[in-house]
Image: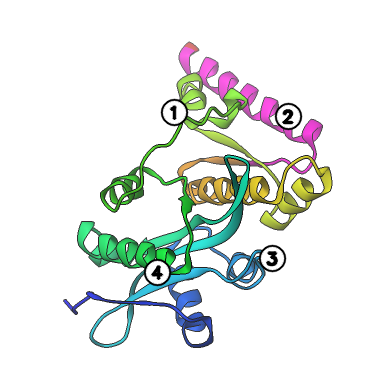
């Protein structure tokens, strides 16, 4: 196995092509559009990211922070939302992951960023806690039960699962949030970061319903649930 220990702060002028190819290969749901929007088009500034490379110069992992202003105790401060974080399949474990996150936080401190928040999955949470992230407060999210995989699978007879996606595309979701004009720029970025994380789980579900029209999506969901329940009833009567 090649040595994965070399970690450096990335530069889009030299690392963009390698970074894009790596994320497309290693991150389910990652798209070129996502890359352009968050790595090149963030109105709050360019992201801070680190890349790991082996002795042959091949990427072994990456982690990123995307700048966004926060209001803390009534004062605006520079901070960031944790973004894409991935280690190559054959190297996944605490070692390479910790090295990436430690290098990223060191670079963030040099930039003067005093706050970074993230919404990690279970695997990433353990790594982030090891490098110093901590729970500041509980975040209560209100959601329709149908948006929870565990709830849906407990109701369906054959352990099938379904999910209503928030919008036909990531761009549509952002347009909706900005058009409503009810959230701040920071809140929008946080919601988009959550949505991106959720979209990565799409392959865990057997059915995807695109919520481009609320009434149509609700009707489709009801039809699919009725069909599954009817099929189970027929099977049980045989």
**Disc 3 to disc 2, C-alpha distance:** 35 Å
**Disc 1 to disc 2, C-alpha distance:** 20 Å
Mark sitting earlier along the chain (3/1): 3
Total count of labels: 4
Residue 176 on image: x %, y %: 78, 47
Residue under circle 1? 159
Is label 3 or label 1 in front? 3
Residue 28 on image: x %, y %: 47, 58
Q: Are marks 1 and 2 in contact (CB under 8 Å)?
A: no
Residue under circle 2? 218
Q: Residue at x 49, y 11 (%)?
A: 237
**Disc 4 to disc 3, C-alpha distance:** 20 Å
**Disc 3 to disc 1, C-alpha distance:** 43 Å
Q: Quadrant of residue 44?
A: bottom right
Instruction: Give whichever of 141, 150 is nearer the camera.
Output: 141
| Residue 222 forms part of the magenta stretch | yes
Mark sitting earlier along the chain (1/4): 4
Mark sitting earlier along the chain (4/3): 3
Mark sitting earlier along the chain (4/2): 4
Residue at the extreme top: 237
Mark sitting earlier along the chain (1/2): 1
Residue under circle 4? 107
Q: Residue at x 69, y 54 (%)?
A: 169
Residue at the extreme left: 1
With respect to residue 141, does 135 lie above or below?
below
Residue under circle 3? 43
Q: Is residue 214 left or right of residue 86?
A: right
């Amino acid at each position: 196995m090649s040595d994965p220990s070399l970690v450096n702060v990335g530069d889009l002028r030299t690392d963009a092509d390698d970074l894009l190819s790596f994320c497309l290969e290693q991150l389910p749901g990652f798209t070129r559009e996502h890359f352009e929007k968050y790595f090149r088009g963030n109105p709050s500034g360019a992201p801070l990211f680190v890349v790991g490379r082996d002795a042959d110069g091949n990427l072994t992992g990456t982690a990123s922070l995307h700048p966004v202003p926060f209001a803390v105790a009534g004062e605006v401060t520079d901070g960031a939302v944790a973004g894409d974080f991935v280690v190559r399949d054959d190297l996944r474990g605490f070692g390479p992951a910790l090295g990436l996150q430690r290098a990223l936080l060191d670079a963030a401190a040099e930039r003067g960023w005093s706050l970074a928040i993230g919404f990690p999955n279970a695997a990433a949470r353990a790594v982030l806690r090891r490098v110093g992230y901590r729970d500041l407060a509980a975040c209560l999210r209100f959601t329709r039960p149908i948006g929870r995989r565990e709830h849906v699978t407990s109701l369906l007879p054959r352990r099938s699962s379904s999910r209503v996606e928030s919008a036909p595309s990531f761009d549509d979701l952002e347009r909706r949030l900005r058009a409503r004009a009810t959230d701040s720029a920071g809140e929008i970025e946080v919601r988009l970061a959550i949505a991106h994380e959720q979209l990565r789980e799409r392959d865990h579900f057997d059915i995807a319903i695109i919520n481009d029209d609320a009434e149509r999506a609700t009707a489709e969901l009801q039809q699919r649930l009725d069909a599954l329940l009817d099929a189970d009833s027929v099977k049980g009567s045989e």
